[in-house]
């Protein structure tokens, strides 16, 4: 894909792959020259002639990987891993499988990778949280996504909305017949288009002719005053390259340049002093105050294939020494396309962090770096199993742009923030009014599904971000207290507080029974519901306070279904109840249970109502020993 050129870690002559034999010599040379399209043709020709082997398959797989043809890359990696390979091959194979939505197969390859490179941060992250995917998929949606009128059948990416209400972006839409051998597309140029925030419409796309050359240009970043632009360009435009005489090829890199506006035109171009012909610097993003420039690079000191770096801008074309932004952001993979917002939130794309596939967009609040803040995956729908990257956000207009190849080409999408409410729950003792530390607080959606569970701080507080104009509820519990459910009313945005007073448990314990509210079950099911769990916690507390007490659980069903089936169902319910109590630390010898089916209804009825059925689906707790 064209975008990869911008952050490409070029392979120079010293690192080029030697031909395996005379048959692969032509294909190997094309591969070393980064002419992947033609290299693939030559390798496939060898396969068709019956001259394919593990080496040829590996070259094909890597070539397709570099072009991000995920289907073909996975196909050839599958042939390669029939024989032992280096760790990175298993990692690449895993990433290609993930990009095709084959998550279980991807995890198998990641386990092999982790076994070979246990100290790699990517391996550690995977082994510590191999089931990370559901957490990302379940994450509350932060943005709504829609396509833009900017897109064509060519590549478009790297859109940023500047203060002049123009969206600047990079594209291969130019009419030049000259193409890049990387993927056989035209070279990149910089374009801009006016944006009307009132009705979210775009004007006519214009080319930034004063900066474009026959080489690659873009993406760009513009200072808050609109007078300075930082942009990426192929170093060969400045005749800055490594000349490989053996391959008869000039290898350029990507460098960052500065331009200033003069009489409405961009000029006075200057190459930044930390540029080099042996490593790339790309994807610039300037802070609101103009004093810090973030960028992507594979310069010495890079932790992975490419990292996010920053450098101080001191004025008068004076710059500090580039600094790697560190492990909270960078990995052994690729970190690219940084964008710093006006409120100091850094967005970037990564292939080395746990994501949905390919490059994913992550964010980190740099104001909280000292508070162990970590980069977070922004989740769907911004991220997909494909490459999602080059996220930018205009805080003044409250709108973001990002790029993705989810439709086949690199296209630009709009990201509209989902309206949110900061809901703070304060859990207190209902009798004393004192805050309760360590209370368990679960937030539920309108269908009573648990979204997330947290514990209160010393001040009894816990905060959730919820969507505007939606109903939620809070379930709060603490050992020794009755659990409670508290509604969060629909809110148009902003902040809201939810008081959650919990009453100390005062369970009725008779000579023969512990009296709880009914532990009701859903129809034809035996799993413990959230409401049932909160009530059973009271029984757990009673048992902990009376260490000699032994309980027998009787579980019942309603009268729907056959007697034999209901007996079996009620027995499962009794066992579920017993298992829940044991899971809370109660010795198994102190609680047992049995199902009684529909033989002992709480309410005798023939044509029972739904409420009567629910009351008959219950459990009772008899005291066997005190």
Image (spheres, rainbow, N blue to C red):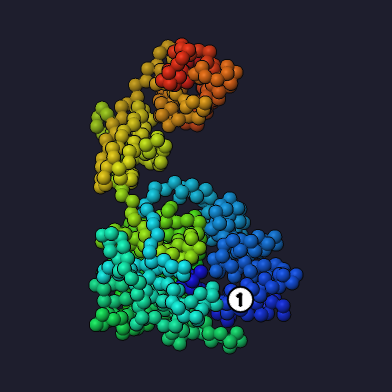
Residue 365 lies, with reference to residue 599, above or below; the image says below
Residue 520 lies, with reference to residue 87, above or below; the image says above
Horizontal and vertical percent position of residue 254: 45, 77
Q: Residue furthest right?
A: 50
Q: Nearer the viewer, residue 177 or 461?
A: 177
Q: Nearer the viewer, residue 120 or 259?
A: 259
Residue 56 appears anywhere in the view: yes
SS for callout 1 = helix
Residue 219 lies, with reference to residue 488, above or below; the image says below
Q: In this figure, which residue is indicated by the disc labeled 1?
A: 38
Answer few, some or many: residues within 10 Å of disc 1's Cα (few below 14, many 20 plus, some between 14 and 19).
Answer: some
Q: Please tell me which residue is depicted at 40% across the width and 59% down the height of the picture.
A: 147
Horizontal and vertical percent position of residue 525: 51, 28
Tell me where residue 563 sits by quadrant.
top right
Q: Please tell me which residue is depicted at 31% across the width and 30% down the height of the picture.
A: 502
Q: Is residue 404 left or right of residue 568?
A: left
Residue 234 lies, with reference to residue 457, above or below; the image says below
Q: Please tell me which residue is depicted at 49% across the width and 55% down the height of the picture.
A: 356
Q: Please tell me which residue is depicted at 32% across the width and 38% down the height of the picture.
A: 471
Residue 424 appears anywhere in the view: no
């Amino acid at each position: 894909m064209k975008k990869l050129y911008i952050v490409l870690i070029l392979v120079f002559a010293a690192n080029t792959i030697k031909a395996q034999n005379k048959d692969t010599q032509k294909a190997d040379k094309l591969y070393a020259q980064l002419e992947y399209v033609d290299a693939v043709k030559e390798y496939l020709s060898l396969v068709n002639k019956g001259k394919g082997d593990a080496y040829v398959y590996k070259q094909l797989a890597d070539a397709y990987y570099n072009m991000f043809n995920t289907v073909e890359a996975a196909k050839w990696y599958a042939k390669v891993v029939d024989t032992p390979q280096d760790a990175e091959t298993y990692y690449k194979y895993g990433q290609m499988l993930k990009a095709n939505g084959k998550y279980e197969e991807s995890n198998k390859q990641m386990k092999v990778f982790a076994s070979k490179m246990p100290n790699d941060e990517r391996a550690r992250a995977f082994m510590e949280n191999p089931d990370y995917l559901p957490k990302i998929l379940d994450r509350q949606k932060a943005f709504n996504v829609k396509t833009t009128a900017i897109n064509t059948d060519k590549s478009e990416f790297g859109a940023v909305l500047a203060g002049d209400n123009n969206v600047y972006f990079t594209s291969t839409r130019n009419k030049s017949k000259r193409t890049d051998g990387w993927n056989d597309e035209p070279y990149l140029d910089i374009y801009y288009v006016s944006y009307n925030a009132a009705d979210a419409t775009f004007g006519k796309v214009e080319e930034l002719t004063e900066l474009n050359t026959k080489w690659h240009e873009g993406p760009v970043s513009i200072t808050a005053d609109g007078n300075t632009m930082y942009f990426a360009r192929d170093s060969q435009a400045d005749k800055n390259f490594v000349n490989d005489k053996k391959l008869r090829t000039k290898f350029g890199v990507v460098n960052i340049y500065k331009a200033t506006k003069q009489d409405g035109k961009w000029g006075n171009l200057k190459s930044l002093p930390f540029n080099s012909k042996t490593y790339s610097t790309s994807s610039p993003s300037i802070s609101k105050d103009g004093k810090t420039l973030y960028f992507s690079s594979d310069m010495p000191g890079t932790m992975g294939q490419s990292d996010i770096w920053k450098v101080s801008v001191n004025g008068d074309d004076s710059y500090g020494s580039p600094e790697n932004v560190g492990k909270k952001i960078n990995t052994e993979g690729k970190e690219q396309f940084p964008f710093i917002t006006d409120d100091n939130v850094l967005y970037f794309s990564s292939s080395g962090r746990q994501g949905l596939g390919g490059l994913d967009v992550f964010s980190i609040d740099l104001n909280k770096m000292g508070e162990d803040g970590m980069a977070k995956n922004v989740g769907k729908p911004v991220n997909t199993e494909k490459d999602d990257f080059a996220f930018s956000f205009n805080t003044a207009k409250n709108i973001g742009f990002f790029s993705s190849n989810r439709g086949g080409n690199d296209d630009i999408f709009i990201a509209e923030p989902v309206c949110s409410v900061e809901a703070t729950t304060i859990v207190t003792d209902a009798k004393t009014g004192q805050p309760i530390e360590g209370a368990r607080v679960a937030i539920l959606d309108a269908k009573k599904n648990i979204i997330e569970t947290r514990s209160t701080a010393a001040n009894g507080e816990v905060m959730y971000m919820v969507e505007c104009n939606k109903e939620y509820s809070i379930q709060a519990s603490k050992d020794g207290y009755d659990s409670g459910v508290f509604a969060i009313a629909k809110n148009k945005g902003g902040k809201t507080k939810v008081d959650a007073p919990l009453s100390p448990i005062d369970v009725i314990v008779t000579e023969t029974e512990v009296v709880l509210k009914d532990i009701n079950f859903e129809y034809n099911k035996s799993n413990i519901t959230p409401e049932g769990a909160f009530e059973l916690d009271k029984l757990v507390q009673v048992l902990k306070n009376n260490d000699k007490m032994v309980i027998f659980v009787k579980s019942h069903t309603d009268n729907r279904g056959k007697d034999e089936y209901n007996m079996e169902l009620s027995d499962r319910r009794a066992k579920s109840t017993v298992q829940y109590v044991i899971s809370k630390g109660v010795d198994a010898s102190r609680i047992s249970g049995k199902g009684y089916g529909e033989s002992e209804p709480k309410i005798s009825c023939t044509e029972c109502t739904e409420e009567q059925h629910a009351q008959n689906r219950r459990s009772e707790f008899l005291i066997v020993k005190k």
